[in-house]
Amino acid sequence: MNGMPYMTAGRDRAMKLAALPVEETYNLMAAAGKVTRDNYGHRVELCTIVNAKSGRCSEDCAFCAQSAHHGTNAKAHGLLPPEEILRQAIKMEKSGVPRFSLVTSGRGIAGRELEEIIATIHLLKRETGLQVCASLGIIGANEAVMLKQAGVATYHHNLETAPDYYREICTTHDYQERVRTIEAATQAGMRVCAGGILGLGETMTQRVEMALELHRLGVDSVPLNIINPIPGTPLEAARVPPPLELLKVIALFRLIMPRAVIRLCGGRREGLRHAQTLAFTAGANGLMVGNYLTTRGGSLEDDLDLLTDLGMEPC
């Protein structure tokens, strides 16, 4: 492991690293941490989201509390008023978080709702200095151009898992629709944020395949979520991967995608537990702060204290 060169997207090399025994995990993390520091120093990108529209989703993603196909207790609401979204945005900006994303449930967004979202984006651009991001489901080229022109800096759309495992977690749309959304956002000139969820029942090989696919698509912001088994969903009894396994995956993503932002997102506290600090030595250099879609996150102050203790610079 000493002196291991940077990887690009070599599948064979990635699979060999994925097969390393558990006792090699810390060496893998050290190599990944060096790659991170060489490319990003000690900077950690911060972002936050607002659940701008919640629940009643037509899609059947097996992990999701917001799907209308599952019997969960997730609260549902239509699009939040622009003034409420602005209030939340200003609060986060004053706290030092520079990226703010509007997230809506559902297959996609169009018509009157798209017009309302665009008006809200204009409001945020006018009243704040935030980088405005959006996660609005499946979109085509026209919607992507409209969002870019409105001022969206980054479009978020997860692959969720490997191509050959996708049908195990969603049957109401196919994997290629997600790929086409990423391509549409890229072609419109937006940065793309795309990753997935660890602990859906996928193998380590499939995790590597997802990372290789993200690299192929040119994604440079990769949110890694950890399964939060929600009662009423098909994955309510899912096994949360142990922390050391999760750290190994973070390191693999870093070594496959040396210049991407590897972003810790939903489930990080529950999944990594006391090992969360080690994620920043394993290759993570991004952090979603604040609340998530249907679950509460920890306090922003705790996250900032964590980064300070580690000598990291939030940006």
Image (tube, helix red, strand yellow):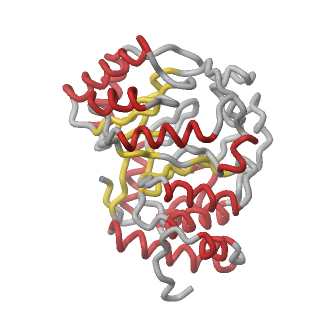
Which residue is at a point 61% across and 22% down the rendered structure image?
57
Closer to us: 33 or 133: 133
Q: Position of residue 158 (x, y in %)?
A: 54, 42
Q: Name above or below for residue 296 compared with residue 209.
A: above
Q: Name above or below for residue 299 compared with residue 36.
A: above
Which residue is at a point 50% across and 14% down the rendered structure image?
78
Q: Position of residue 183 (x, y in %)?
A: 45, 43
Q: Position of residue 296 (x, y in %)?
A: 54, 35
Instruction: Give the tally of numbered discs.
Output: 0
Q: Name above or below for residue 256 compared with residue 187.
A: below
Which residue is at a point 56% across and 58% down the rendered structure image?
211
Closer to us: 286 or 173: 173
In the current view of this chain or complex, which residue is farthest to the top? 112
Give the side of residue 205 with respect to residue 50, left or right: right
Quadrant assignment for the N terminus = bottom right
Residue 71 figure quarter: top right
Which residue is at a point 69% across and 77% down the rendered structure image?
20
Residue 155 figure quarter: top left
Closer to us: 51 or 272: 51
Closer to us: 11 or 118: 11
Q: Position of residue 192 (x, y in %)?
A: 41, 45
